Image (cartoon, coloured by chain):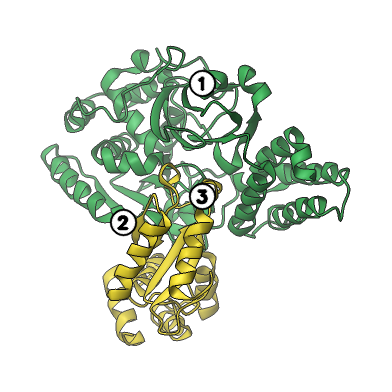
Chain colours: A yellow, B green
Amino acid sequence: MIQTKTIVQELVKKHGNNRESLIPVLQGIVEKNNYITDEDIIEIANTLDISAGEIYGTTSFYTFLDTEKRGKYVIRVCKSIIAVMKGKAEIIKTIENILNIKVGETTPDNKFSLLEANDIGWSDKEPSMLINEKVYTELTPEKTTEIIESYLRD
Amino acid sequence: MSEKIKKVDNIFSKDCNCKDILAKTLKKDKDSFIQELIDSGLKGRGGAGFPTGLKWKFAKMAEGDEKFVICNADEGEPGTFKDRVILQEVPQKVLGGMALCGHIIGAKKGFIYLRGEYAWMKQDLQKAIDEMHDAFKTMKLDFFIDIRMGSGAYVCGEETALIESMEGKRGEPRNKPPFPASIGFRGKPTVVNNVETLVYTLMIAHIGAPEFKSLGTADSAGSKVFSISGDTPIPGVYELELGMKLSDFVEEFGDGDTKAVQVGGASGFCVPRRKFNDTVIGFEGIPTGGSMMLFNSHRSMYNVLHNYLDFFVEESCGQCTPCRVGCQQLLKGIEAVKSKERDSSYLNELIKLSETMHTASKCGLGQSVANSFNSIVEEFTEEIMY
């Protein structure tokens, strides 16, 4: 994990020292570390001169601005009704079996977190999932296994 | 394609140069182009359906030392994916529409608010923007476009919530009025238009209002891009003439066993088979932001409704009580009826609750839960009960 102070300063330098840059800064932290820590929030509060409570309030509003500890790869399987109809449950089961975690959990080595997401915009090609920012569609258990295994080797 | 459904090739058509269209339109009188937009009858394609020409007119008339154009690319409605395809296939048309809007209303800065789920396309989109910036320079058009990312909040598709989010805050909808056209981003006059709407403005500049409204009906001029999914052999994105009958739509896209169509996503209406014949897709019938989900007779409508309510419980921003508490109670309510904890008469109470939410909620999210809730509960009562 990159040091809080450095990363916050870098992001503020890039996005600007004002309220409007708060979300881009928080997004930048998630991009680098996958979740936002209390230290991050306090550091941003000091730098942007906004109360830590206000920042936490903003952070907690957005699904992707996680404050819970997440793994290096965050898997988000789409759970829309169309995804359900096209076999989402099997995809979840496949991933749970390979990684030995349940939805909402992170592997002990902090490499993977498994989550569900509301519609990610691929109802024409469900089941689908995001792994960090990458998207995978028309999943089958076999295809899912291959994808997860390629990340395991990484 | 059946003769009753008219497929249109406007949005994705590549046989027009959007830079030329833009350059040509920049030379025209601004007010007469606004009049052309108003005459075309174009209404917002994101779902709410506000007349686009009027929106631009109000923003142009509004006083402000600075104005903004925002492209709403936060499509989060379940079953919608058309903006994804538009942004992938014809980004330059979207950017052209934004620049045109900026020129007309007097804005020098535009933003694309791109949903976090689409972060994978950010790089390609930025490339298209860079290329367009060069074209603007050649045209001597002072306009700059930036991308702002969403972070997974459905309600940010509501234009004032989107603006709050862009200002670095929780995406909680504002009271309207004032509308963004007078007080928007940073308190300045702002036009927020859907991705598809912006493309149509450029296409109207190209083909003119009469040709645009030669398609569609009096209330629903032109064509629209639909996202078609569910129990269909041919899911995907289709540009179709507005005002079609749902029965014709089902004949074209159904799998022969269509029980119901959810028109307009989780916040839209569920239409059962017996009403296909009498249902028109458009502003005079059932409007849609494009989401069309087909369900065949194997599907449980209880599961469908449960899925929608789960979605609303998660996505309600929590700011106003009717929506925050109402969504939770509706979900608990149908679970209680299903498990026989409550008898069927309880469904009537839940319908009253959803009607209260419709009246009392602050924004479209809470107001529209009643659409899917009432239509599914009323049309598929047995499936909810047993």
Which residue, given by chain and number where applicable, does mark 2 sit on? Answer: B120
Tag of residue B251: 1
Q: Is disc 1 surrounded by few (<14), some (14 to 19) or many (20+) residues within 10 Å?
A: some
* Residue A55 in the image: above or below residue B1: below
What's the amino acid at mark 3?
Thr
Q: Amino acid at mark 1?
A: Glu
Given the image, what chain letter belongs to the residue carrying mark 2? B
Determine which residue is flagged by label 3.
B160
Disc nearer the start of the sequence (1/2)? 2
Q: Have a look at marks 1 and 3 and say if they share a chain.
A: yes
Residue at image position (51%, 32%) is B50
Look at discs 2 and 3 and give the one toward the viewer.
2
Q: CA distance from mark 1 to mark 2?
A: 35 Å
* Residue A83, position as x, y percentages in the image: 50, 50
Alpha carbon separation for disc pair 2 and 3: 25 Å
Label 2 in the same subunit as label 3: yes
Identify the residue at image location x=31%, y=43%: B87
- The structure residue drawn at horizontal position 59% and vertical position 34%, both measured from the top left corner, is B296
Q: Is residue A116 above or below residue B255?
A: below
> Is B296 in front, or is B172?
B296
CB within 8 Å, label 1 to label 3: no
Q: Chain of mark 1?
A: B
Task: Provide residue B341's location: percent of width, then percent of height.
Answer: 86, 56
Q: Position of A79 compared to B185: left or right? A: right
Question: For the residue labelled by badge 2, is the local secondary structure a helix, a strand or a loop?
Answer: helix
Q: Which quarter of the rendering shows the C terminus of chain A?
A: bottom left
Q: Considering only order in the chain, which callout, 3 or 2, is on the residue closer to the N terminus?
A: 2
Note whether residue A114 is visible: no
